[in-house]
Amino acid sequence: MYTPVAADVAKLRNTTGAGMMDCKKALVEADGDFEKAIEILRKKGQKVAANRADRESTEGAVIAKVNEDSTMGAIIALNCETDFVAKNDAFVELAHELAEQAVFYANKEEFLASDFHGTTVAEKLIEQTGVIGEKIEIGSFERIEGPFLGAYIHAGNKIAAITSLSSNVDGAADAAKAVSMQVAAMNPIALDETMVSQETIDKELDIERDILTKEGKPANIIDNILKGKMQKFYKDNTLVHQAFIKDGSMSVADYVKSVNGDLKVVGFVRVSLA
């Protein structure tokens, strides 16, 4: 009967992330065949994943990354079932590594099918489900490209954001991070009023019109009041018009202009577990 040596167990553990005893058992079952042992561990992960398929994975780590020249970025949520696992160093490290890879793929499907240390990302998640014993999956995937990107991950890895600025000028890195903090904290619905969906506008107008009618406001002045209401709505809910969280005396657009007169916010993405 094959008896695994410590070096082989350690190698298998480093490759798969599985526990020492699981690695030892897999090597014994595979009679020392390293590739077969990996397959055994993956099949174990598939069995665990099947058993956990109906579970909710609402905890996890939300990680944002940008590439070296700050022109491409991605945010992923690596989801699990419990906060205990979400705070585990190895789990968070895996989330960071996956987010770094996600930057280079256009969508979630391409990312899940991409190679990750000799397996696919999707297979790695199944493998980790077997290792950890909880349902592990990519819950959210957001990608952005732009002239200059900056990212922010909120403490606890529950919210992350990436902001795109119009150019890479002096101070752009700090500005992009500051605006990303704004996005994380204030959760704007759009960049500006031109990016708000007509459905959202119509819904807001209907709500405000109903309130004003019930208040007994004359029909001939309701439209003028609604214009003011919508301006307030855009100020509160669109990124460039929001009051800057670090200095409420200026808007986000004004803050960015204070860094450089030609600088603008041109896009953002945000992911939250909540």
Image (cartoon, grey):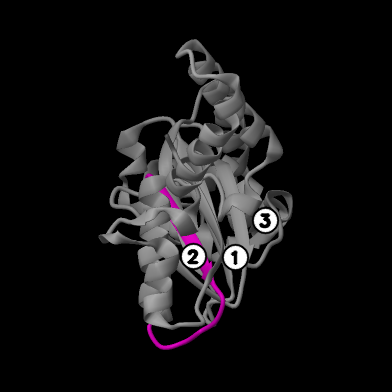
- In the rendered structure, the answer to whether residue 182 lies left or right of residue 164 reads left
Q: Amino acid at mark 3?
A: Phe
Q: Which residues are magenta?
A: 158-171
Q: Are marks 2 and 1 in contact (CB under 8 Å)?
A: yes
Question: Which residue is under mark 2?
Answer: 65
Horizontal and vertical percent position of residue 256: 42, 72
Q: Is residue 66 above or below residue 200?
A: below
Coordinates of residue 141 in the picture (x, y in percent): 60, 49
Is 55 placed above or below 11 here? above
Q: Inspect the image, locate mark 2, and give the three-letter code of the amino acid beneath it.
A: Lys
> Dots 1 and 3: beta carbons under 8 Å?
no
Left or right: residue 84 compared with residue 65: left
Q: Which residue is mark 1?
A: 103
Residue 3 visible here: yes
Estimate how packed mark 2 is, as few (under 14), some (14 to 19) or many (20 or more) residues with alpha carbons within 10 Å.
many
The mark found on residue 3 in the picture is: none
Residue at point 63%, 36% (across, down)? 201
Residue 19 counted in the magenta span: no
**In the rendered structure, which disc, 2 or 1, sits on the residue that comes first in sequence?**
2
Which residue in the structure is indicated by mark 3? 111
Q: Residues within 10 Å of mark 3 (few under 14, many from 20)?
A: many
Direction from residue 59 to residue 29 in the image, left or right: right
